[in-house]
Amino acid sequence: MNTNNTYKISNFLFLSIILIITGCANIVAPSGGVKDVTPPMPVKSEPNSNTTCFNQKYFRIWFDEFIKLKDITNKIIISPPLNESPDISIKGKSILVKLNENLKENTTYNISFENVIADITEGNTLPQFQYVFSTGKYIDSMTIKGKVIDAFSLEPSSDVAIMLYKENLDSLPLIKKPDFIGKTNKAGEFAVNNLPCGKFKVFALKDANNNYIYDLPNEQIAFIDTMVSSYFIKKSVKDSLKKDTVNEMAIKYPELELYLFTEVDSTQKLIKYDNSIPGQLKFIFKFPVKNFSFKPLKPLWTPNMYVVDPSYKGDTIMLWYTDIESDSLEAIISCAAKYNDTLKIKLAQEKNLRTTSKRVLELEKLKISFSATPSKPVDLNQSFKIFFSKPIISQNFNNIIFYDNKDTLKPEIHFLDSTRRILEINYNWKENTEYFLYANPETFKDIHGFYNDSIRVKFKSKQIDDYGILKIKIENFPQNTNIILQLLNVQNNKIIKEIQVDKAKLLKIDYLAPGNYQIKTIYDKNRNGQWDTGIYLKKVFPEKVEIYNQNIKIKGGWEAEINLKL
């Protein structure tokens, strides 16, 4: 075979192989692979974490992938706190932190990046990471740990600042930033690490303006009334016989419990008033109102021209008036908490709303609702109620017909409130029975002169087996205090029953709907019938609250009993 033929055969074989490979290859989209759920991990830092004699103006931390930062203003905690915030930036796979002030001598600094560092692809966040250094010759390694709990709900409080002071002065949280700080996690837990050996005044603060000062009335605070010692979590002890062996001896210290509360500012204040609806004014105060007084000056309304409704809500007063022609009002309002003010109010004008016919109809019509309906049976131990949208100034109970499937009935009928917006019908209901109520048109007239249309409602009573019974045996009753016992619906945390108790006894709560319940116990130390919050400067803690540690299941037709040991 000559050289030319050999070359042709070689080319032919090469092309054949290429065609075979190309023909067999299918184009397939690359698979997504396993989803990345691993957060970025630190690989090195400069200077190294736990460096002593630190004298740099910056430090840098490298990670194993590209990163981003989340909410660095609120989540990065530097303890001891700095006066000037550092400059924090991302450089490739690293974080660069530039310090903008001179550091304290012989001090250990802890920079916590909890839930701040995330990868740029899936957003996986590094849950806990701390960079530590000391300007002295050693790293402080003591700690103070604990948990912050809402004093009334007993729920853990997250994102609460933990503030430690070396001094023992009561005014510290009001005037000075703390010497060391920490923050609670979602479970309300905290650990302030890298502390020096010593005792500290400990506070928890729900810091509304992030300045580490207790300076706003809506900020929540918790405190320990004694100085607290820092401690080691674990202590390493070397065995003198076997130098290569290290035994770790855990030292148990009780973790702190701080109960967070909001102090009550006793100064009453009118927050705002609502004058958007003709014939109606709404005054909203800072605290529940007692002995509200209203004195109109201009125009000089007579007492029959307005009605004050104190039952609308504890901190809200509703006032209904008939002078819908006036465009302004000057009046003096006052209440028992030494509050007195003269207001000039622009009144909503009915004539200005005539162009919006739907709104006018909504404002003028007397609206009526009922406590029981065909889909909502009446409880055997409850009355039937009719709710009116406005105060009623006249009524004719003779126009009301009430009956069951057999007879016309004669229940007790009366208004529950001073403004006559709630009509109560009392009757000894038979179980599983249908009832009917009818009222003629113009049976009720409201303060603005509008009447009701025909009222027709049908409802049914419940059966006795629809209810369960709960018996509570109270034991170990404390001396010199009363107990407020609250029965709560677990699903919506609504108070179903509240009972004042002054001694150990057996309580019986009947007519309970099936469901899960919880018992909250309030130790009413001053016996004023309510839960009282704390006062920091007077060293008054909020009144103690306990929750029975098991849910109570109530079944229809069944009786449950528990022992409540106080």
Image (cartoon, grey):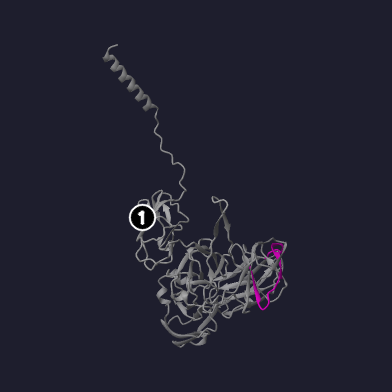
Q: Residue furthest front?
A: 241
The location of residue 410, given as percent across then percent down, is 69, 74
Q: Is residue 40 visible?
A: no
Q: Is residue 95 visible?
A: yes
What span is in magenta? Answer: 461-487
Q: Amino acid at mark 1?
A: Ile
The location of residue 31, given as percent across then percent down, is 43, 39
199 versus 447 height, above or below: above
- Seen in the image, is 277 located left or right of residue 525? left
Q: Which residue is mark 1?
A: 90
The residue at the point 50 percent across, 83 percent down is 306
Q: Quadrant of the N terminus?
A: top left
Between 208 and 105, the one lying in front of the other is 105
Between 476 and 392, the one lying in front of the other is 476
The location of residue 41, given as percent across then percent down, is 44, 50
Q: Residue furthest top?
A: 1
Q: Residues within 10 Å of mark 1 (few under 14, many from 20)?
A: some
Q: Is residue 185 magenta?
A: no
Between 160 and 321, the one lying in front of the other is 160
Q: Quadrant of the C terminus?
A: bottom right
- Seen in the image, is 195 located left or right of residue 248? left
- Seen in the image, is 444 located left or right of residue 70? right
Between 158 and 422, the one lying in front of the other is 158
The location of residue 183, given as percent across then percent down, is 48, 64
383 versus 515 height, above or below: below
67 versus 200 height, above or below: above
The residue at the point 58 percent across, 57 percent down is 249
